[in-house]
Image (cartoon, helix red, strand yellow):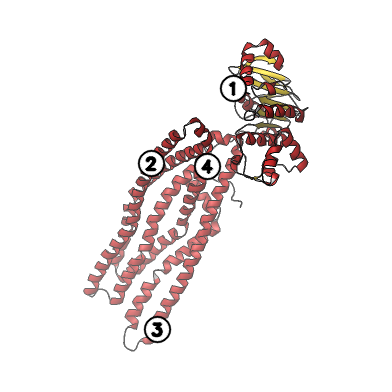
Amino acid sequence: MEAGKPDFRSAGRYLWWLVRTQRGRCVAGAVLGSTWMVGLTLPPYLLSRAIDDGLTPGRWPTLAGWAAALLGVGVVNAWLGIMRHRTMTRVRMHAAFATVEAVVSQATRLGSALSRKVTAGEVVTIGFTDVTVIAQTLTITGPGVGAVLAYIVVAVLLLTVSPLLAVVVLAGIPLLVGLAGPLMGRLRTAETTYRTRQGALAVGFVDIAGGLRVLNGLGGKEVYAERYRRGSQDLQAEGYRVGAVTSWIQALGVGLPTLFIGAVTWLAARMAVQGDLTVGELVAVYGYTAVLVVPVSFFIEGGYDLSRGLVAARRVVQFLSLTPVPRGDAHAPSGAAVLRDQESGVEITPGTLTALVSARPAESAAVIDRLGRFSEPAALWDGTRLDEIDLTRVRERILVADNEADLFAGPLRDVVSGRGDPDDEAIERALHAAVAQDIVRGLPDGLDSAIDPQGRNLSGGQRQRVRLARALLADPETLLAVEPTSAVDAHTEAAIAGRLRAARSGRTTVVTSTSPLVLDQADTVYYLEDGVVAATGSHQDLLAEQPGYRLLVSRGMAAS
């Protein structure tokens, strides 16, 4: 669907944008809702005429005529009710899908910046909770308009019966709606707090689910479970607070109109006893007042839905207001060029295999992030800042492969292929370079075997090799790999190191590692201390000249 660019200047403007994107449907819903609700006022009038004009000896034709009219109005109103419901269902569905489309498009625009600007739990909560609430809010465009018209029509009809009753109704209905006003404010505050806690709890759940194996290994599962349990209990308490306010609003929506009907009926009955009203008019007054329960309920429910909708829309607007990484207008180098990280002093020569070594893996990973334009300050590419070059061009030519990269569910063939459509021969070459053929052989259907989300049906080492195979198959001009062999045994690591060099021959490749098996294959090794280059050379040169490097690498040899 094409809903156009959303208006996210405020929550109210966003809801109004959802209405504008389907003007015709909303107008149809308003017309059908108004006609249906006004039609509800006709049966009391027809019934009063049938009583006053038809319940007289010899007036059977008149009675039959009014009864037929009553039946006809009922049939038409039933049809209007069906069409109103269908139309408003389409309005709600359009609003939901338009919001989902806006959120997904924004997530795509944010790209790699998404995880740094908003949590996965927040996005999930928007997609499942806020979208539904916003869609429900648009119900006010149909029956909400009809409720206003029905209120006016009933007031006019009562004016023809008794000016006193008309005044009571005209003054009483706004009073009833006004009594629920303060509760709407409390509900908005409670909903905002609840929504904030819900998002935070969703984040915790995603973190626990994603790191469950690690937590088990560290013995921290119970600690995080207890933390989540406390957060869940706090959310439950906040939910009870929201429920308390909601229950009062819904109770008032049913109870106040009922009390009002009783008061108006009592007044009309006294007037009938005094001879000011006929029996038919008394029945009509009761019917008119009973019909008013519907618009009054819609007034209160509409206020309730609008309060919740504004809270949900505010969260969506905040997400849509996040700014993606700015697009540069400088030209990318026409061919392979030097990449330089000014922060650390690392300089990547085109067509070589370069290794980054640090006692703190986060420091070498930070260099990779800057070289791949995932963090500031920007690196230089042939003398031009990366953030001044169109991000699309950067992503097409520089690929960062890390151990946290997502593995989507689907056949292994699709998981490895990424966005491309390689043939089986190319896939086989990539799997061979990543020493991942045994994974294919171990799965029941080979390349057609189903892989769970994030590769949960694979071991850690298997996931790492699948990610590496995918990166190699993409064949970028520059490949930046973070610890590509950290989860495999020494034999597999040695094979990967040799095959990686062969597979990337003539292409620019950067790896972070402390494994001598990998470092020995590198053309250039940068030894980092405190995030900056302390020494540069071949693996053998650094072993001979740098005690710190020698000690660090010897730990890697002992570990392997």
Residue 49, image x, y percentages: 35, 78
Kind of residue sitting beneath label 4: Val
Kind of residue sitting beneath label 3: Ala
Q: Which mark is residue 58?
A: none
Left or right, 136 with reference to 508: left
Q: Which mark is residue 233?
A: 2
Label 4: which residue? 123
Considering the numbered disc 1 on the image, is that residue within a helix, a strand or a loop?
A: helix
Closer to the camera: disc 2 or disc 4?
2
2 and 4 marks in contact (CB < 8 Å)? no
Residue closest to the eye, 15 or 311: 311
Left or right, 56 with reference to 275: right
* Sequence-first tag of 1 and 2: 2
3 and 2 marks in contact (CB < 8 Å)? no
* Sequence-first tag of 4 and 3: 3
- Neighbor class of circle 3 (other Cα within 10 Å; few <14, some 14-19, many 20+) is few
Kind of residue sitting beneath label 2: Gln
Q: Is residue 118 visible?
A: no
3 and 1 marks in contact (CB < 8 Å)? no
* Sequence-first tag of 3 and 2: 3
Label 1: which residue? 363
Considering the numbered disc 2 on the image, is that residue within a helix, a strand or a loop?
A: helix
* Sequence-first tag of 3 and 1: 3
Residue closest to the eye, 44 or 357: 357
Closer to the camera: disc 4 or disc 1?
1
Q: Residue furthest left?
A: 274
Closer to the camera: disc 3 or disc 1?
1
Residue 16, image x, y percentages: 50, 50
Separation of marks 4 and 1 at Cα, in angstroms: 29 Å
Residue 260, image x, y percentages: 29, 62
